[in-house]
């Protein structure tokens, strides 16, 4: 139950698979998870990312299949168990550091696909600009491993290949220039062959059942981690605003009840002088508390806006913020316990593409007259071109 809740909070109920196929077409599928079943919610297609992005839900997460002419695939039969030896057997002169590779093995039969890292990274970045987050990817026809056991036919087509199987294991793959339109029944769902790979991609992160081996597991982990951080940040803002609204509503009703009590006491003040005195004291107390609340909200909002504006204005163009928290919560919120904030503290996290500008920015922050210290909590590589960082800023006591 807890795992289901975590999955729901992270992914929601909508899952997406996107395939770039060899006919220069982008095919996407949206799956909807309803309790213990999965249904096809929608299928869309287009020629470019700019064309397909508006057809998908905003800020949708997706699994990417790169299966176009940028991918080289070979299907070999070998008793070799080593990934590197299989890779060099298929591609002898491969510069492995420049390529992503993925291997789908079925006994002695191996489907090996490669693609330049720069090509895949560029696609992921293009989707990111369209507010579509890629959380995993696959090359060629490797993701058929997820669905082959659900297909009854002994052979079946994808968008660009014919696969044969025996005992639910793939025994042959042949590229096809002309592919007929076929429909396959997968666990009660009708799926066309042009949507088969993106369906498998979306299904793989619903079932958490990716079985291929590759050299981009760390890249996928980084993509998922980055998505989780953004998801948490957006949900934290929503929950935070909801909490603030609830507090304000409670304060309003509490103040309103005090006000009604004051009015009631006014009506009896002429009869009972002692009650009149209590009425005045109660009203003064309410007014004082209301003024205190107003002052706190006003000052806190003013200070936090000033700090955030100053930090944002100092930020170099080579850096992107993922999170900025003023007076973060010190400990987990517990029932019947006061919320403890880390006073005079701002935490920042984000991504940098230039270490020199990052160092200059740290110095710029330290020179601000309201900042006491700047502590770098983390500065580590996320990929070849970007670096994750997190900072803790200690303010002078306000």
Image (cartoon, helix red, strand yellow):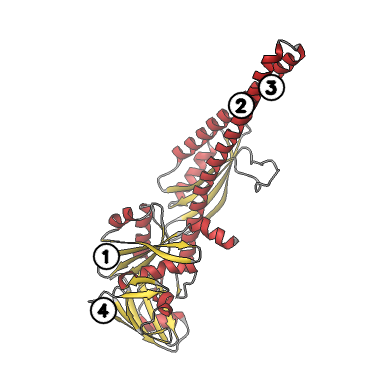
Say which mark, if any, is on residue 256: 2
Mark 2 or 1: the one toward you: 2
Q: Is residue 109 above or below residue 67?
A: below
Can residue 1 be seen here? yes
Mark 1 or 3: the one toward you: 3
- The residue tagged 3 is 285
Disc with the residue nearer the chain's start (2 vs 4)? 4
Label 2 and label 1: CA atoms lie apart by: 61 Å
Q: Secondary structure at mark 4?
A: loop
- The residue tagged 4 is 176
Q: Secondary structure at mark 1?
A: loop
Q: Residue at x 34, y 75 (%)?
A: 184
Q: Quadrant of the C terminus?
A: top right
Q: Is residue 190 above or below residue 4?
A: below
Where residue 277 sits, quadrant-wise, is top right
Q: In the drawing, does residue 174 fall left or right of residue 221?
A: left
Label 3 and label 2: CA atoms lie apart by: 14 Å
- The residue tagged 1 is 25
Where residue 249 sits, quadrant-wise, is top right
């Amino acid at each position: 139950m807890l795992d289901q809740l975590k999955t729901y909070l992270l992914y929601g109920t909508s899952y997406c698979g996107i395939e770039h196929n060899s006919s220069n077409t982008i095919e996407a599928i949206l799956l909807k998870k309803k309790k213990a079943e999965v249904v096809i919610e929608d299928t869309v297609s287009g020629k470019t990312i700019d064309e397909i992005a508006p057809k998908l839900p905003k800020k949708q997460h997706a699994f990417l299949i790169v299966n176009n002419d940028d991918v080289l695939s070979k299907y070999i039969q070998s008793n070799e168990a080593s990934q590197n030896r299989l890779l060099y057997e298929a591609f002898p002169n491969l510069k492995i550091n420049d390529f992503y590779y993925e291997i789908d093995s079925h006994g002695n039969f191996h489907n090996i696909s490669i693609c330049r890292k720069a090509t895949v990274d560029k696609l992921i970045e293009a989707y990111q600009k369209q507010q579509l987050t890629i959380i995993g990817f696959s090359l060629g026809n490797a993701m058929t491993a997820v669905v082959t056991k659900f297909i009854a036919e002994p052979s079946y087509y994808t968008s660009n290949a014919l696969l044969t199987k025996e005992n639910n294991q793939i025994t042959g793959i042949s590229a096809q220039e002309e592919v007929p339109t076929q429909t396959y029944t997968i666990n009660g769902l009708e799926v066309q062959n042009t949507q088969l790979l993106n369906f498998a991609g979306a299904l793989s992160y619903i079932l958490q059942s990716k079985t291929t081996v590759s050299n981009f597991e760390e890249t996928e982990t980084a993509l998922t981690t980055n998505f989780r951080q953004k998801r948490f940040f957006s949900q934290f803002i929503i929950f935070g605003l909801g909490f603030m609204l609830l507090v304000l509503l409670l304060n309003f009703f509490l103040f309103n009840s005090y006000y009604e009590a004051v009015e009631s006491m006014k009506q009896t003040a002429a009869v009972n002088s002692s009650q009149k005195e209590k009425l005045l004291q109660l009203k003064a107390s309410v007014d004082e508390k209301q003024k205190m609340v107003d002052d706190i909200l006003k000052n806190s909002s003013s200070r936090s806006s000033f700090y955030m504006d100053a930090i944002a204005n100092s930020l170099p163009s080579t850096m992107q913020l993922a999170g900025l928290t003023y007076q973060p919560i010190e400990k987990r919120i517990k029932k019947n316990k006061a919320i403890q904030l880390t006073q005079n503290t701002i935490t920042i996290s984000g991504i940098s593409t230039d270490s020199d500008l990052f160092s200059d920015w740290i110095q710029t922050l330290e020179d601000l007259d309201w900042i006491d210290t700047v502590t770098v909590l983390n500065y580590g590589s996320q990929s070849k071109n970007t670096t994750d960082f997190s900072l803790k800023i200690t303010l002078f006591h306000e």
